[in-house]
Image (cartoon, helix red, strand yellow):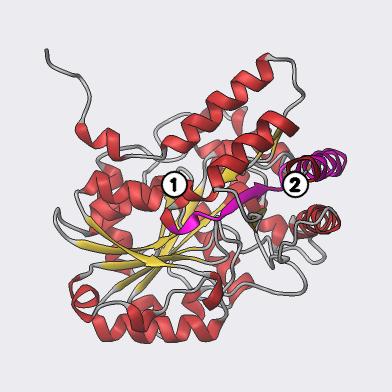
Amino acid sequence: MKRWESKRLAELGSAIFSEMAAWKKEVTARGVDVIDLGIGSPDRAPSARVMEALTRAVNDPGLYGYPTSEGSELFRQTVARWYTHRFGVALDPEDEIVTLMGSQDGLAHLTMAVTDPGDTVMVPDPGYPIYSASLVLAGVQPYYMPLRADNGFLPKLEDIPEEVARQAKFLLLNYPSNPLSAVADLAFFERLVEYAREHELLLVHDLAYSEMSFDGFKPPSILEVKGAKDIAVEFHSLSKSFNMAGCRIAFMVGQRDAVRALRVLKSNIDYGVFLAVQQAGIAALEEDMMPGSRSVAALYERRRDIVIEGLNEAGWSIPKPKATMFIWAPIPEGWTSRQISREMLYSAGVVVIPGDAFGKEGEGYVRIALVQEEGRLREAVRRIGQFLREASL
């Protein structure tokens, strides 16, 4: 009997996420108050200014026609102004920016736009799952770059086989990183750009967490490197920086040919982001450019400190990350990532994600998302501490 399901679906996503959802459902059905530190979905609303802009736009009957797939001219112009304000990078709104239905939209489709079946693409391990999933959809072969603590979770470019580097179409990285919470400085990006030029690679950089950094660190854009726009594109999202995850709005900027290729593909797939949502995005970016504006970073820095310091007191030593809404925690000896995640849920009612959900190099870690209010985080820390004490008996 025919099966109405593509074989490629079996290669998409991670079974671990499905398992975690089933475990959570079972524990919740028992009446347990589950504290979910799994999915990185912001728990705050956008600013009042953004919600007011969205409300006005939704009530405008002139905004209900098809938008353009590349995004409105005004939104792209605002993105260009924000990039200059934030990074000192000049962008041409006509040729170097494309609006997206969230960065996952662009990450899922860019591979199809710039590669052919059988090509090779270099992606990080561990890495956000869509990086690998996009290669499956495009029929492209992955080369996994291991990211390990001994090198600050940066790839060792010198360890990549020369043949792979010569054959690959693009190299994808993400700093500040999900799930690793690792960061990269401009000196690293300068070396990366030089490496890409030498091997004629397109660089793809996911910068979704640039506004969630701590301890005075300011994540750079790869486009700050001189000449990087010739060989690099960068993704940015309003989901995490401005608490607009449900709005589904983001953008890709940089190398003109790659921007054009993604625009062409998307023009055959969708009609773009609802214009009212683009108006809200404009409000968010404009508000961020105002003198004295506040980012979400301070909120997540406080949450980071509560969890890290509390777990350290409980005997679980975890380095403090400099960015993102995640903690990448090396697990105590004697556990696998999946075992400790399951037992923490069943015994303590706290959801974390096992590291191997993000690639084989993620074994030995769990990802903790800072997506609850401070009181709930303190309770989660208390429960985890009790779990660790009982587990060591």
Count the numbered circles shown: 2
Q: Is mark 1 on a helix, strand or loop?
A: helix
Residue 370 percent location from the top left of the image: 72, 48
Closest to the observer, 384 or 110: 384
In the rendered image, residue 385 lying in the magenta stretch gets the answer: yes
Q: What element carries label 2?
A: loop
In the rendered image, residue 144 lying in the magenta stretch gets the answer: no
Q: Is residue 200 rendered to the left or right of residue 150?
A: left
Residue 390 percent location from the top left of the image: 79, 40
- What residue sits right under mark 1 in the picture? 104
- What residue sits right under mark 2 in the picture? 392
Task: Write down the region rendered in magenta.
Answer: 361-388
134 over 231 or under it: above or below: above
Residue 185 percent location from the top left of the image: 57, 80
Q: Which of marks 1 and 2 is in front?
A: 2
82 over 161 or under it: above or below: above
